[in-house]
Amino acid sequence: MLRYLKIRSPCIIGLILASLFIVCLLHHNLTTELSVRNSVAIIPNKSLESTSLLSSPRELLLLYEQEYSRVESTSFRPTFHNHHLTLKLNLTAIAIEYFDYFKNSSTKTTSALKITCLQSSKNRNNFRSICDIFLTFQIKILNSQKVQLTLLSKNTSCSVLLTNISDLILINVHQTFSIDDIFRFTHQWTNTNNKTELFWRSWPPTTTTCLKSLPCSLTNILTHSTSKELFLTEQNAVSYWLDLQYQVFINQRLSNERKKSVNNRNFVPYEIAKNPRVCSSEFQNWILDYQKWHENIMLNINNGSMTFEEQRNRIIELDVRFLIYEKHTSGLSDRIIHLISTYLVALLTKRLFIFDKNWPEFTEIMQSSLNYDQQLIIPWIEQLDLLNKNLTQNDRKYLTSKTEWFSSNRLLKDYDYDKLFPERILTFKGHTGGVIQTIHSNSSIYRKFLTIDLQMNTNNIFGCLYHSLFTYKLSELINRAPLTSSDLPVGHSSQLILQILLAPIFFPIGVQVRAGDETMNEQNIDQSNPEHIIGKYQNFLACIQQINMINEKLVDKTIRTPIVFLLSDSYEIRRAALKLKPLSLECYRLSEKECQLNYYDLHVLASPNPVFHVSNDTNRVLAFKLGMFDIFLFSLCEQHLISTESSFGRFPAFASLKQRNIYSLGLHELKSCKNDGLPLSAVGYQWSGI
Ligand SMILES: *[C@@H]1O[C@H](CO)[C@@H](O)[C@H](O)[C@H]1NC(C)=O
Ligand SMILES: *[C@@H]1O[C@H](CO)[C@@H](O)[C@H](O)[C@H]1NC(C)=O
Ligand SMILES: *[C@@H]1O[C@H](CO)[C@@H](O)[C@H](O)[C@H]1NC(C)=O
Ligand SMILES: *[C@@H]1O[C@H](CO)[C@@H](O)[C@H](O)[C@H]1NC(C)=O
Ligand SMILES: *[C@@H]1O[C@H](CO)[C@@H](O)[C@H](O)[C@H]1NC(C)=O
Ligand SMILES: *[C@@H]1O[C@H](CO)[C@@H](O)[C@H](O)[C@H]1NC(C)=O
Ligand SMILES: *[C@@H]1O[C@H](CO)[C@@H](O)[C@H](O)[C@H]1NC(C)=O
Ligand SMILES: *[C@@H]1O[C@H](CO)[C@@H](O)[C@H](O)[C@H]1NC(C)=O
Ligand SMILES: *[C@@H]1O[C@H](CO)[C@@H](O)[C@H](O)[C@H]1NC(C)=O
Ligand SMILES: *[C@@H]1O[C@H](CO)[C@@H](O)[C@H](O)[C@H]1NC(C)=O
């Protein structure tokens, strides 16, 4: 038996194995629908058992971290995604790997590297060379430990697109390959006779090939993956990694006696989304059809070696229409709300959905289920005017286009997108959401299709769309929640926050207090009087207490303790709350009889670190990454209390798929929360909508 299954009570395991679904412990009358969760995702593959016997969950997590840092520092990383072959070279890593070689040839100032791509079909094992790539580098010996490489020139025997940014070289081979193709690579410094096979690390490690034996992911054979396959691989890897995190929590934080009574970890929203009772099978099939269509069209209009004219002919012939998503310059949540709204329009009107080309950090941390890379599909879009120049607007070949800006009128306006926008290439810009209006409005022409044909409603539509489009990558979770050796003096490490939110012994209420950009600056804070600071947000405190009182009748106090996961741009309020009312896990080390957290106390879980704003260039990328992590955590909460004048808490509450009413407060608004809160259909019209 798996070591980490041991602690699960036998009856629960029996239940999981016996049926596909388990009903969550909490029967909550605030929800119209019970959360019924799909438990398949966390039943580990049997082949893992042998590994887990060898290593503790903590050791396995450490293995993931080590493996990831090795992947990051690899010199050579090829990918074969969506029929396209790409090679990524890290010059810093090459300089380290071949240091001895460069040192020896210290008199030479240039050196050429020859990389040969060898192709075969899966079924036949006869590789043949399809491309030679020569890269000429300038070699500069900086000191006795370091050399620097600069790419001077390249020549290649096949057509490629080479991008050279800082220490990275990206080589895209201009050709589409079959999904049955496989590749190998050799390399050789041209002034030596030593031709060697290239090895690299595949990522994310699959639980079947990896973690069994190290170096587990080292390989020299490259196989094909579609975006959809990468998306599912990430989700499986993350689910397993979350299982380990939860196991570590149980092992480290709970007394032996308590360990016996804990259940499986909570499901995370993308796992909930797989349940057809949450996202209907009609909806899931609709998405699958669209994904297949998208993949097929992509392949048909760009085979990697088509001229623009050939591509244009194909687009007209197949009558392909495009919808390009462009992000807003403002906050992260505005961008995501507009993204999901645009995606919905693409689905409803069967337009080829294309992502913003100026948002690389998004694709770095999120894996999409669609291959929607603008550079790959319509790299010519920037020169559309030029390409249309010789044609009249009535010409069949003329590619019509339009850019539409959506403001707050989107929230209440019904659109007939096909009628309003006959253009072939549409670009949507904006900072607001129209998903709820599209499904909820009596006069929406899409309402019947969404609610009757697809069996969707205002509670699940946004979350189901969100989790069908992209998923958080394992690499980013590892970056954000590293294994920390010790607890922080004040507050909780991101790893601990994640673990606690996965544990069904708590009932987390996600509270988002948007205090204003000026509160982000850590220099301005007054830490001398935490009571005073907390006092400024008395309305939020009172509301939390009222919510707890309502929940008291519903939450089994002996099983789940209510806690508050506090999300705020204000560093000051999080520090103050952590000083006065921190969630302490000390008592969980004792037996249940000796200690139980007081139900009525406030137990605050929060990060003690400052946050940044995505529109501030100083920390733009980090701000985005921290923001997306906060959103992921916030979406793990059972219930939500958000700031009315912000989208940052609103959309993860929809994405959480808890399908519960939301509580919402203005910064200084005095409003009782002794009620059922607001249904999602109403919250979807607040602020910039959903
Ligand atoms: C479990 O692993 C085996 C190989 O060891 C594989 O054939 C099987 O498909 C895996 N099952 C799942 C559900 O991943
Ligand atoms: C390149 O490799 C170096 C060292 O191996 C590593 O520190 C760096 O992060 C890598 N760069 C990128 C962009 O992955
Ligand atoms: C470096 O040069 C020394 C002496 O010429 C030689 O013995 C050694 O094999 C060389 N090393 C490499 C990596 O070429
Ligand atoms: C690659 O980038 C470096 C530094 O940015 C630049 O000096 C060099 O000319 C570039 N090489 C090519 C082939 O574009
Ligand atoms: C490409 O560069 C390599 C190394 O400099 C050279 O040996 C080869 O002849 C070149 N090939 C072409 C086609 O220029
Ligand atoms: C050839 O290169 C490989 C790896 O780069 C190295 O391990 C090996 O020692 C080299 N062989 C010779 C004869 O230089
Ligand atoms: C790509 O399409 C063009 C135009 O139809 C055709 O000439 C070319 O042979 C195709 N290339 C591949 C690799 O399929
Ligand atoms: C437009 O016509 C001019 C003159 O006939 C020609 O030089 C140019 O290449 C054409 N442009 C396109 C995009 O077809
Ligand atoms: C929309 O339909 C609902 C239910 O049929 C009804 O209660 C509501 O009044 C309608 N709203 C409008 C604006 O017609
Ligand atoms: C941007 O962030 C930096 C560092 O966090 C801070 O010093 C600066 O004041 C911020 N700028 C604005 C306009 O908020």
Image (cartoon, helix red, strand yellow):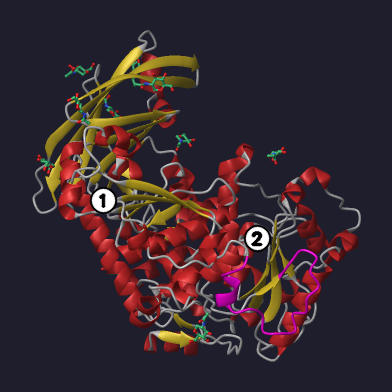
Task: Tell me which residue sits at (34%, 64%) in the image.
Answer: 347
Label 2 within 8 A of ligand 10 by Cβ: no
Look at the picture and state if 329 lies above or below 294: above
Which residue corresponds to mark 2? 646
Q: Quadrant of residue 30?
A: bottom right
Instruction: Please indicate whether residue 485 sits to the left or right of residue 369 in the image.
Output: right
How many other residues sit within 10 Å of disc 1, few (<14), some (14-19) or many (≥20)? many
Along the horizontal axis of the image, is 454 left or right of 622? left
Residue where numbered disc 1 is placed: 82
Closer to the camera in the image, 319 or 549: 319
> Quadrant for ligand 10?
top right
Q: Is residue 548 above or below residue 52?
A: below
Say how many tags the image has: 2
Q: Position of residue 668 (x, y in %)?
A: 80, 65
Query: Which region of the structure is painted magenta?
Result: 665-686
Q: Residue 48: x, y in percent?
A: 38, 67
Please identify the residue farthest to the top as the structure is shown. Answer: 107
Q: In the image, is 551 to the left or to the right of 444?
A: right
Is 238 displayed left or right of 599 in the figure? left
**Quick one: 658 or 45, which is closer to the camera?**
658
Q: Is residue 690 visible?
A: no
List x then y, in percent, for residue 2. Answer: 44, 74
Mark 1 or mark 2, earlier in chain: 1
Q: Secondary structure at mark 2?
A: loop
Q: Secondary structure at mark 1?
A: loop
Kind of residue at disc 2: Ser
Amino acid type of the residue that numbered disc 1 sits on in the rendered structure: Asn
